[in-house]
Amino acid sequence: MRETTTNRGSIGSATLWMIGLSILLFWLPPFGPLIAGFVGGRKAGGVGPAVIAAIIPALLVAVLLFILATLAALPIVGAIVGAGVFFVILLESVPLLIGAIVGGALAD
């Protein structure tokens, strides 16, 4: 008799895979995040968790930079710099998000 197990991935492991592969493949500008998103999407086990796992690193980095810029510089300048960096990070996360959606769709 054959056992069927539903091995659903986790958002945490998918996020770690995406971060790790993004760091390792930084030298492939559009393709590095795309590959990282694909692998992370497969690890997440579905499209929904893959999208969440792709957004978490961008949000964490943006919030951390926003807080550091606000504390280190003048609060208004720090807020403007933090908001600007947030939008740059979101734009740079597009290939990661596309890869996560494709990887999550193929994991189903």
Image (spheres, rainbow, N blue to C red):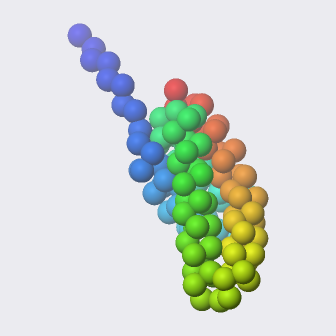
- Number of numbered callouts drawn: 0
Q: Is residue 80 above or below residue 62?
A: below
Q: Which quarter of the image is occupied by the N terminus?
A: top left
Residue 6: percent from the left, percent from the top? 36, 25
- Percent position (x, y) of residue 13? 41, 50
Residue placed most toward the observer, 62 or 22: 62
Residue 78, above or below 61: below
Please report the residue visible at 68 percent of the width from the left and 88 percent of the height from the top: 74
Residue at the limit of the structure toward the top, as seen here:
1
In the visual, does 7 lie left or right of 74? Answer: left
- Viewer-proximal residue, 31 or 85? 85
Residue 35 relative to residue 84: left or right: left
Residue 10 is situated, as x and y percent measured from the top left of the image, at 41, 42
The image quadrant that residue 88 belongs to is bottom right
Residue found 51% across the figure and 39% down from its top: 49
Q: Can you tell which quarter of the image residue 31 is in?
A: bottom right
Using the image as rendered, state which of residue 38 and residue 71 is in the foreground. Answer: 71
